[in-house]
Image (spheres, rainbow, N blue to C red):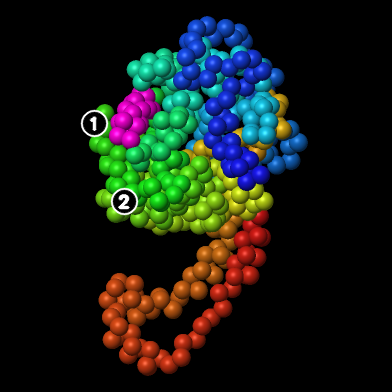
């Protein structure tokens, strides 16, 4: 049973790579011919779905926004500028619903059961129709989700170039990637890691893959580039030289910085922390660990963090904690908007629908002044049992509305001012002459001992946690 559960942990990573069809598939890296055929799809991909519009909280139409009104100004910015929503290509167009206990459940009408270039182009056209109907102008991708892996690196690069050329054409002037990334975890070559692999050939291959992925992200006008080190970690320390692997990882990331500058890519480089899964221990465990790593290796000025909410809970933190840790360290760059199930101990990548959590998330975003050039990427997938095409729209609408409602709640909290005043009063003893000296680093232990002797036993005030929670809940 334990082995089965471990397999289930991995299903979130691999499900989007399977091909949603009952027909024989043509997966990457097999000897079969995957490049033949033509797109062959006529008409719309979502003919029964209208362009999604804002209808307000009283609407009962599931294909409408109730809280997200893109051009409405909240706290001095349009909602769309606070949110900067993005769609994850891998979950939306490569997710199949497969898990270790069952076969794929999602058989989208446009899928033909292959991993051919023609099928990749068809998916790309479906992606942009989806974006336009949903009213979202950003998308995210891994290199290998959008184009099939070839038999050689050169062939893989050529496949990617062909699909990216179509994406560039379909984007027009208004749509662009929020971020791109290289998929450095699925292929067997990466079983020991990519930048932390014990094999120098794998390290070189990963570098070449990141080089190309960054180039196409730049070509498409991408605003960020993400590093998710799903296999940058270990299963046991008995066979691991951890210092050497961390040094290699830092050298790899520095080389990425150098290449970014050489090609003129002005986007932000982002590290996405996660504690484990698929490794037992991932080196960028959480925001604090990643911040310490960046500081140790002199990379703090070159990277920010892409905080994923489900990863936060896997590391034993709330999403709000991870966002605040990133924010106060000047590292909050992007948010992968999803959530997990408190009864399940792995990365379930569900759409965020908890209004309270969304409000806490937006509290951090507002305190940060926004996320640009980052945004909210829906790194979230339909449940295995959700199999209608309209479910793809409903899930995203729900996620967008949830965060929009969170923003509206933050505006209420700020307008009311009670929560901010409670926090101010809690620390008001430092708003004094001696407090100012302490915070400026000018109060030594001799001075503080003198004050302690003078004041006697300190008076300790109530933290008013229940009142803070009451004020917060009143905004929901």
Which residue is at 31% across, 30% downward? 201
Q: How far across and down, in percent of the image, does residue 173 sit?
A: 43, 22
Instruction: Depth check: give the residue in front, 367 or 20.
Output: 20
Q: Secondary structure at mark 1?
A: helix
Query: Is residue 204 covered in magenta?
Result: yes
Residue 204 in view, yes or no = yes
Query: Is residue 209 covered in magenta?
Result: yes
Q: How far across and down, in percent of the image, does residue 112 sit?
A: 61, 13
- Residue at the outermost right position: 60
User: Which residue in the protein does label 2 denote?
Assistant: 243
Prevalent SS, magenta region:
helix
Q: Which callout, 1 or 2, points to the residue nearer the camera?
A: 2
> What span is colored magenta in the figure?
199-219
Q: Secondary structure at mark 2?
A: helix
The label shown at residue 262 is 1
Instruction: Depth check: give the residue in front, 147 or 172.
Output: 147
Q: Residues within 10 Å of mark 2 (few under 14, many from 20)?
A: few
Image: 14 above or below 44: below
């Amino acid at each position: 049973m334990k082995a089965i559960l471990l397999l289930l942990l991995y299903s979130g990573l691999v499900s989007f790579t399977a091909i949603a069809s009952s027909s024989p598939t043509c997966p990457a890296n097999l000897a079969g011919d995957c490049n033949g055929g033509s797109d062959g799809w006529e008409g719309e991909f979502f003919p029964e779905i209208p362009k999604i519009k804002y209808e307000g909280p009283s609407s009962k139409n599931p294909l409408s926004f109730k809280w997200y009104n893109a051009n409405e100004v909240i706290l001095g910015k349009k909602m769309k500028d606070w949110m900067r929503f993005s769609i994850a290509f891998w979950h939306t167009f490569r997710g199949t619903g497969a898990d270790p206990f069952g076969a794929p459940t999602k058989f989208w009408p446009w899928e033909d059961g292959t991993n051919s270039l023609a099928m990749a182009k068809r998916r790309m056209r479906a992606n942009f129709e989806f974006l336009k109907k949903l009213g979202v102008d950003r998308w995210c991708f891994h290199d290998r989700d959008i184009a099939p892996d070839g038999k050689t690196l050169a062939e893989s690069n050529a496949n990617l170039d062909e699909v990216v050329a179509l994406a560039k054409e379909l984007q027009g002037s208004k749509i662009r990637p929020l971020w791109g990334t290289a998929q450095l975890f699925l292929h067997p070559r990466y079983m020991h890691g990519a930048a932390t692999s014990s094999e120098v050939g794998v390290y070189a291959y990963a570098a070449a893959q990141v080089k190309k992925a960054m180039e196409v992200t730049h070509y498409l006008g991408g605003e960020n580039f993400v590093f998710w080190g799903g296999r940058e970690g270990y299963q046991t320390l008995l066979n691991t030289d951890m210092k050497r692997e961390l040094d290699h990882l830092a050298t790899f990331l520095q080389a990425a910085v150098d290449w970014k500058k050489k090609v003129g890519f002005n986007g932000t480089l982002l590290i996405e922390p996660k504690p484990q899964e698929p490794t037992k221990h991932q080196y960028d465990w959480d925001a604090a660990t990643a911040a310490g790593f960046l500081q140790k290796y002199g990379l703090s000025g070159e990277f920010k963090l892409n905080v994923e909410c489900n990863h936060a809970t896997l590391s034993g933190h709330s999403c709000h904690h991870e966002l605040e840790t990133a924010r106060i360290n000047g590292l909050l760059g992007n948010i992968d908007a999803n959530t997990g199930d408190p009864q399940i101990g792995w990365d379930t990548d569900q759409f965020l629908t908890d209004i309270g959590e969304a409000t806490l998330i937006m509290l951090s975003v507002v305190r940060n002044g926004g996320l640009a050039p980052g945004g909210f990427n829906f790194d979230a997938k339909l449940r295995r049992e959700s199999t209608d095409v309209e479910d793809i729209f409903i899930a995203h609408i729900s996620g967008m509305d949830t965060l929009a409602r969170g923003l509206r709640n933050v505006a209420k909290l700020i307008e009311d001012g009670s929560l901010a005043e409670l926090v101010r009063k809690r620390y008001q003893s430092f708003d004094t002459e001696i407090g100012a000296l302490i915070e400026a680093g000018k109060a030594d232990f001799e001075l503080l001992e003198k004050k302690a002797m003078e004041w006697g036993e300190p008076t300790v005030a109530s933290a008013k946690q229940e009142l803070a929670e009451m004020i917060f809940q009143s905004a929901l």
